Amino acid sequence: MRRAFRAVIVLSVVGAVGLAGCASQKKSTASTDPVADRQRLMKLHGALWKDLQDKHKAGNVEGMEVDAEALALNAQRIPALFPEGSMTEKSKAKPEVWQKWPEFEAAAKNLETQSVKLRDAAKAKDTASVDAQMKDFGRNACGTCHTPFRQPPPRQG
């Protein structure tokens, strides 16, 4: 029952994000702050990643399917959240996003691909494949974008 409730909540969030994305693509006035939009999406990604890690640690492979699907769907929206000229002091994006646009789009596509692999493994209840995907997901999915295209967070001293 809890799993079904959590799935409904995650799917509702994904649906709302998807609808907002559709609305912003149809109306250019839907958002005037792409930096805030992408930061919200990345916070959602962080929450999904934490939930995936928690479920993995708990052995809830089946429950990971929904979160991985949400990551895959949201990855499709990433390039649209980086219009040229949207680098502000609030942004953590490096200029390389726009200088190496094809590589940036490929990194977003890679996140989608890695998320789909994780989703499919979870759906199949293939624990060995889920374990393999989770082992390097941060480096192979998130890191292919964060490392070359995002300013590192400030060091905590």
Image (cartoon, grey):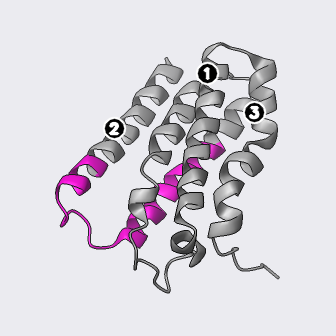
Residue range corresponding to the magenta coloring? 21-50
Residue 57 visible in this rendered orientation of the protein: no
Q: Quadrant of residue 130?
A: top right
Spot occupied by residue 86 in the image (x, y as percentages of width and height): 41, 77
**Magenta stretch, main secondary structure class:** helix
Q: Residue at x 27, y 73 (%)?
A: 32
Tell me if residue 56 comes above or below residue 107 in the rendering: above
| 32 falls in the magenta region | yes
First reached walking from the N terminus: tag 2 or tag 3? 2
Q: What residue type is labelled 3?
A: Gln
Q: Which amino acid does label 1 sit on?
A: Asp
Return the disc, 3 or 1, that comes first in the chain's sequence. Answer: 1
Residue at the spot of label 1: 120
Residue at image position (73%, 49%) is 138
Instruction: Give the spatial CA distance, label 3 vs label 1.
Output: 11 Å
Could you say whether the residue bearing mark 2 is in a helix, strand or loop? helix
**Front of the two marks 2 and 3:** 3
